Protein backbone atom coordinates (compact mmCIF):
# COMPACT_ATOMS: atom_id res chain seq x y z
CA UNK A 1 0.00 0.00 0.00
CA UNK A 2 1.22 3.49 -0.76
CA UNK A 3 1.50 6.02 2.03
CA UNK A 4 0.06 9.52 2.20
CA UNK A 5 3.54 10.96 1.72
CA UNK A 6 4.08 8.85 -1.42
CA UNK A 7 0.71 9.89 -2.83
CA UNK A 8 1.31 13.55 -1.99
CA UNK A 9 4.64 13.46 -3.82
CA UNK A 10 3.38 11.38 -6.74
CA UNK A 11 -0.35 11.35 -7.49
CA UNK A 12 0.20 8.59 -10.04
CA UNK A 13 0.89 6.26 -7.10
CA UNK A 14 -2.72 6.73 -5.99
CA UNK A 15 -4.01 5.97 -9.49
CA UNK A 16 -1.86 2.84 -9.70
CA UNK A 17 -3.20 1.70 -6.34
CA UNK A 18 -6.76 2.50 -7.42
CA UNK A 19 -6.46 0.32 -10.52
CA UNK A 20 -5.04 -2.55 -8.48
CA UNK A 21 -8.34 -2.70 -6.59
CA UNK A 22 -11.01 -5.16 -7.70
CA UNK A 23 -13.72 -3.47 -9.83
CA UNK A 24 -16.42 -3.30 -7.15
CA UNK A 25 -13.88 -1.83 -4.72
CA UNK A 26 -12.96 0.82 -7.30
CA UNK A 27 -16.64 1.74 -7.63
CA UNK A 28 -17.06 1.84 -3.86
CA UNK A 29 -13.99 4.03 -3.45
CA UNK A 30 -15.31 6.46 -6.08
CA UNK A 31 -18.59 6.61 -4.15
CA UNK A 32 -16.88 7.31 -0.84
CA UNK A 33 -14.67 9.99 -2.37
CA UNK A 34 -17.65 11.70 -4.00
CA UNK A 35 -19.54 11.55 -0.69
CA UNK A 36 -16.57 13.11 1.09
CA UNK A 37 -16.05 15.84 -1.50
CA UNK A 38 -19.75 16.56 -1.96
CA UNK A 39 -20.96 19.25 -4.31
CA UNK A 40 -17.48 20.68 -4.77
CA UNK A 41 -16.80 18.12 -7.52
CA UNK A 42 -19.11 19.70 -10.11
CA UNK A 43 -17.73 23.25 -9.91
CA UNK A 44 -14.25 21.75 -10.09
CA UNK A 45 -14.93 20.29 -13.52
CA UNK A 46 -14.24 23.24 -15.81
CA UNK A 47 -16.90 24.66 -18.08
CA UNK A 48 -15.45 22.52 -20.85
CA UNK A 49 -17.26 19.53 -19.36
CA UNK A 50 -20.19 18.72 -21.59
CA UNK A 51 -22.72 18.51 -18.77
CA UNK A 52 -25.57 17.87 -21.21
CA UNK A 53 -23.67 14.92 -22.66
CA UNK A 54 -22.83 13.53 -19.21
CA UNK A 55 -26.43 14.11 -18.15
CA UNK A 56 -27.72 12.37 -21.26
CA UNK A 57 -25.64 9.27 -20.62
CA UNK A 58 -26.67 9.37 -16.96
CA UNK A 59 -30.36 9.49 -17.98
CA UNK A 60 -29.85 6.42 -20.18
CA UNK A 61 -28.30 4.53 -17.27
CA UNK A 62 -31.04 5.74 -14.92
CA UNK A 63 -33.68 4.31 -17.29
CA UNK A 64 -32.32 0.77 -16.86
CA UNK A 65 -33.23 -1.61 -14.00
CA UNK A 66 -31.01 -1.14 -10.93
CA UNK A 67 -29.17 -4.46 -11.23
CA UNK A 68 -28.36 -3.55 -14.81
CA UNK A 69 -27.12 -0.13 -13.63
CA UNK A 70 -24.52 -1.83 -11.45
CA UNK A 71 -23.40 -3.97 -14.39
CA UNK A 72 -23.11 -0.86 -16.58
CA UNK A 73 -20.83 0.77 -13.98
CA UNK A 74 -18.77 -2.42 -13.75
CA UNK A 75 -18.50 -2.62 -17.54
CA UNK A 76 -17.31 0.98 -17.73
CA UNK A 77 -14.72 0.40 -15.00
CA UNK A 78 -13.51 -2.80 -16.73
CA UNK A 79 -13.46 -1.19 -20.20
CA UNK A 80 -15.84 -3.84 -21.51
CA UNK A 81 -16.90 -3.28 -25.09
CA UNK A 82 -20.57 -2.49 -24.44
CA UNK A 83 -22.67 0.35 -25.79
CA UNK A 84 -22.61 2.29 -22.51
CA UNK A 85 -18.89 1.73 -22.01
CA UNK A 86 -18.12 2.88 -25.57
CA UNK A 87 -20.31 5.98 -25.16
CA UNK A 88 -18.51 6.73 -21.91
CA UNK A 89 -15.13 6.11 -23.53
CA UNK A 90 -15.85 8.81 -26.11
CA UNK A 91 -16.35 11.49 -23.42
CA UNK A 92 -13.77 14.09 -22.41
CA UNK A 93 -12.03 13.74 -19.04
CA UNK A 94 -14.12 16.46 -17.40
CA UNK A 95 -17.34 15.06 -18.85
CA UNK A 96 -16.44 11.65 -17.41
CA UNK A 97 -15.92 13.32 -14.04
CA UNK A 98 -19.36 14.96 -14.32
CA UNK A 99 -20.96 11.61 -15.28
CA UNK A 100 -19.66 9.92 -12.12
CA UNK A 101 -20.88 12.87 -10.10
CA UNK A 102 -24.37 12.43 -11.58
CA UNK A 103 -24.24 8.73 -10.72
CA UNK A 104 -23.32 9.58 -7.11
CA UNK A 105 -26.22 12.02 -6.92
CA UNK A 106 -28.53 9.37 -8.36
CA UNK A 107 -27.32 6.89 -5.76
CA UNK A 108 -28.13 9.44 -3.05
CA UNK A 109 -31.59 9.98 -4.52
CA UNK A 110 -32.26 6.26 -5.03
CA UNK A 111 -32.64 6.51 -8.82
CA UNK A 112 -29.33 4.66 -9.27
CA UNK A 113 -28.62 1.44 -7.42
CA UNK A 114 -27.45 2.57 -3.99
CA UNK A 115 -24.44 1.49 -2.02
CA UNK A 116 -25.56 -1.02 0.62
CA UNK A 117 -26.11 0.81 3.93
CA UNK A 118 -23.66 -1.38 5.81
CA UNK A 119 -20.93 -1.40 3.13
CA UNK A 120 -17.40 -1.07 4.46
CA UNK A 121 -14.39 -0.32 2.28
CA UNK A 122 -11.77 -3.06 2.16
CA UNK A 123 -8.65 -2.31 4.21
CA UNK A 124 -6.68 -1.51 1.06
CA UNK A 125 -9.38 0.82 -0.31
CA UNK A 126 -9.84 2.47 3.11
CA UNK A 127 -6.12 3.23 3.36
CA UNK A 128 -6.18 4.78 -0.11
CA UNK A 129 -9.33 6.74 0.74
CA UNK A 130 -7.76 8.05 3.95
CA UNK A 131 -4.67 9.17 2.03
CA UNK A 132 -6.71 10.85 -0.73
CA UNK A 133 -8.94 12.84 1.61
CA UNK A 134 -5.85 14.26 3.35
CA UNK A 135 -4.69 15.81 0.06
CA UNK A 136 -5.61 19.33 -0.96
CA UNK A 137 -8.70 19.78 -3.08
CA UNK A 138 -6.92 20.20 -6.41
CA UNK A 139 -4.92 17.01 -5.84
CA UNK A 140 -8.14 15.15 -4.99
CA UNK A 141 -9.77 16.33 -8.22
CA UNK A 142 -6.68 15.35 -10.20
CA UNK A 143 -6.81 11.84 -8.74
CA UNK A 144 -10.54 11.54 -9.42
CA UNK A 145 -10.16 12.76 -12.99
CA UNK A 146 -7.22 10.45 -13.64
CA UNK A 147 -9.09 7.50 -12.15
CA UNK A 148 -12.18 7.92 -14.32
CA UNK A 149 -10.48 9.06 -17.53
CA UNK A 150 -9.03 5.61 -18.21
CA UNK A 151 -12.36 3.85 -17.81
CA UNK A 152 -14.66 2.97 -20.67
CA UNK A 153 -14.05 1.27 -23.98
CA UNK A 154 -12.89 2.89 -27.17
CA UNK A 155 -15.67 3.54 -29.68
CA UNK A 156 -16.03 0.64 -32.10
CA UNK A 157 -14.53 1.23 -35.52
CA UNK A 158 -17.21 1.91 -38.13
CA UNK A 159 -19.91 2.24 -35.50
CA UNK A 160 -21.77 5.28 -34.26
CA UNK A 161 -20.28 4.62 -30.82
Image (cartoon, rainbow, N blue to C red):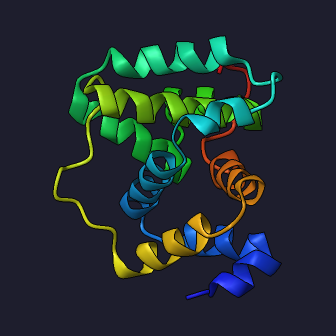
Q: Residue at x 56, y 48 (%)?
A: 79
Give coordinates of residue 74: x percent, y percent.
41, 47
Q: Give the quarter of the image for residue 159.
A: top right
**In the displayed structure image, the side of residue 10 where residue 131 appears, left or right:** left
Can you say which quadrant of the picture contains the N terminus? bottom right
Q: Residue at x 70, y 48 (%)?
A: 145
Q: Residue 153 placed where, x, y %? A: 62, 41
- Which image quadrant is residue 62 in? top left
Of 50 and 136, nearer the camera is: 136
**In the shown orientation, is residue 145 left or right of residue 18?**
right
Figure quadrant of the C terminus: top right
Asked if one can make out residue 81 in the rendered structure from this viewpoint, the answer is yes
The answer to whether any part of residue 155 appears in the image is no
Residue 99 versus residue 74 in the image, above or below: above
Q: Position of residue 48 (x, y in %)?
A: 83, 23
- Is the residue 90 above or below the residue 118 in the image? above
Give the total of numbered labels.
Answer: 0
In the image, what residue occupies the spot 51% across and 26% down?
A: 83
The relative height of residue 148 versus residue 7 in the rendered view (above or below) is above
Q: Residue 82: horizontal and vertical position, in percent? A: 49, 33
**Closer to the camera in the image, 119 or 70:** 119
Q: In terms of depth relative to the viewer, which is nearer, 88 or 141?
A: 141
* Left or right of 66, for residue 89: right
The residue at the point 61 percent across, 26 percent down is 87
Amino acid sequence: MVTFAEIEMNLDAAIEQFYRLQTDRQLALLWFIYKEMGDSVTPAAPATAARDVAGGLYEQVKATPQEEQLQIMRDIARKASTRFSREYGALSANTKLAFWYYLAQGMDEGTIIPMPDNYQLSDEAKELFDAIIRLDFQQQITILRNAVVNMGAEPAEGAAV
